[in-house]
Image (cartoon, rainbow, N blue to C red):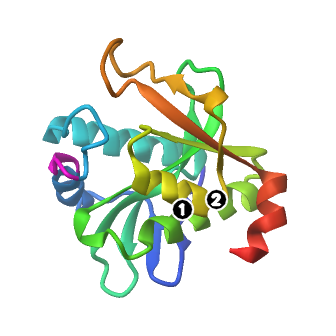
Amino acid sequence: MSEATSLRTKRLVMRPWREADRRGFRMLNADPEVMRYFPRPLSAERSDSIMEAWQDHIDRHGWGFWAVEQASDGAFVGAVGIANATFPAPFTPAVEIGWRLSRAYWHKGYAQEAASEAMRYGFDELQVDEIVAFTLPTNLPSRRVMERLGMRHDPADDFEHPSVEAGHPMRHHVLYRLARVDWRATAGRR
């Protein structure tokens, strides 16, 4: 078990999960608009299972997909972080970055702000060589965040996500990558 890390940005706190986050995370995962790039909205039980798995990752490693709250008032925003991706794919094992925010917090720059800090932590503190991100080809909002983070897409890296059933229209995913050396070369320009 590692000591859990919390991160801060100007407007956000990224921290381990609390029981009080359960309700907000359930609401976020049940929102069809938030979940439109996933096969389906999640049940309360599945949402709880993911929250517990993400906290378990934090307990084991000290970092992971953190709960995110506004620094000003402690309001639950969503989840952002980095975690080990170990499912079978040509690019795994890898460290992935991801975000899922409640709709009330879209279009405020929160995803990029928190993801930038998670990426900094991964490259500077953990010294990972590369961070990846993936989504559906049609998820243009997340793809724009990936591009603003400096990540690059090569269609040769795209893959069929093994946790989505064969033949499902959401099985095909695009992969973005950023190497630590490339991040360091551009970090000052962000």
Q: Is residue 163 magenta?
A: no
Determine the main secondary structure of the stretch shown in magenta: loop
Give the distance between the C-alpha atoms of the residues marked 1 and 2, in whole angstroms.
Answer: 6 Å
Disc 1 residue type?
A: Ala
User: Considering depth in this image, is 105 or 120 the residue closer to the camera?
Assistant: 105
Q: Quadrant of residue 105?
A: bottom left
Residue farthest toward the bottom in the current orientation of the protein: 72
Q: Is mark 2 on a helix, strand or loop?
A: helix
- Using a 10 Å C-alpha cutoff, classify the residue at mark 2 as few (fewer than 14 neighbours), some (14 to 19) or many (20 or more): many
Residue 26: assigned label: none
Q: Could you tell me which quadrant the C terminus lies in?
A: bottom right
x then y, percent, for residue 125: 74, 60
User: Considering depth in this image, is 187 or 140 the residue closer to the camera?
Assistant: 140
Q: Residue at x 33, y 15 (%)?
A: 165
Q: What stretch is highlighted in magenta?
A: 29-33
Evaluate whether residue 10 shows in this view. Answer: yes
Q: In this figure, which residue is indicated by the disc labeled 1?
A: 115
Disc 2 residue type?
A: Met
Q: Which residue is drawn at 52% across and 71% down?
A: 113
x then y, percent, for residue 187: 75, 69
Q: How many labels does the image show?
A: 2
Q: In this figure, which residue is indicated by the disc labeled 2?
A: 119
x then y, percent, for residue 63: 56, 52
Q: In this view, does 121 lie above or below 55?
A: below
Q: In this view, does 161 lie above or below 108?
A: above
Q: Could you tell me which quadrant the N terminus lies in?
A: top right
Q: In which quarter of the image is residue 189?
A: bottom right
> Is the C-beta separation of discs 1 and 2 under 8 Å?
yes
Evaluate whether residue 1 shows in this view. Answer: no
Q: Residue at x 24, y 54 (%)?
A: 25
x then y, percent, for residue 130: 73, 44
Q: What element carries label 1?
A: helix
